[in-house]
Amino acid sequence: MHPAIDSTAGEREHSTWETVMTTATSRANILVAKYLYVATMSFTAAVLNLAAMMFSMGTILGPLFRRRQMDASFQIRFSPCR
């Protein structure tokens, strides 16, 4: 979402909106370029997020699924405080 906001509001903050509007290309080309930029950054963020989740869940759930012979159980052991 940040690239989408920065590609429009950031142009006005950095005073580059007027420069972009004076380029020798049509406004439709600028709009398409900004759209493709946001789509590419969103796709990249989604792929990296998915990879991070798969890595995290693999390291967390890996030991549980390696021992298929044993029944899975959840135990809380209370030990006296010393």
Image: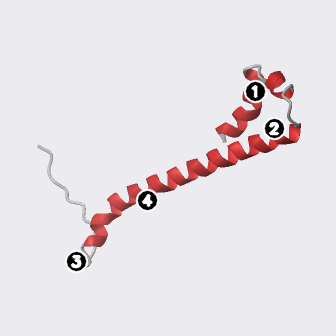
Measure the alpha-carbon separation of dots 1 and 2: 12 Å
Q: Is 15 rendered above or below residue 51?
A: above
Above or below — where is 69 with respect to 40?
below
Q: Earlier in the sequence, mark 1 or mark 2?
A: 1
Q: Are marks 4 and 1 in contact (CB under 8 Å)?
A: no
Q: Which mark is residue 54?
A: 4
Instruction: Give, as a three-letter code, the residue at label 2.
Output: Ile
Pick whichever, 50 or 34, lies toward us: 34
- Looking at the rendering, in which quadrant would you find the N terminus? top right
Q: Quadrant of residue 78?
A: bottom left
Q: Determine whether, in the image, residue 11 is placed left or right of residue 3.
A: right
- Amino acid type, callout 1: Glu
Name the side, left or right, on which 9 lies relative to 72: right
Q: CA distance from mark 4 to mark 1?
A: 36 Å
Mark 1 crowd level (few <14, some 14–19, many ≥20, 10 Å Cα) = some
Three-letter code, disc 3: Met
Q: Which residue is mark 3?
A: 70
Residue 79 against residue 62 in the figure, above or below? above
Which numbered mark, 2 or 3, is in the foreground of this view?
Answer: 2
Please tell me whether mark 3 sits on a helix, a strand or a loop. loop
Q: Position of residue 6 (x, y in %)?
A: 70, 32
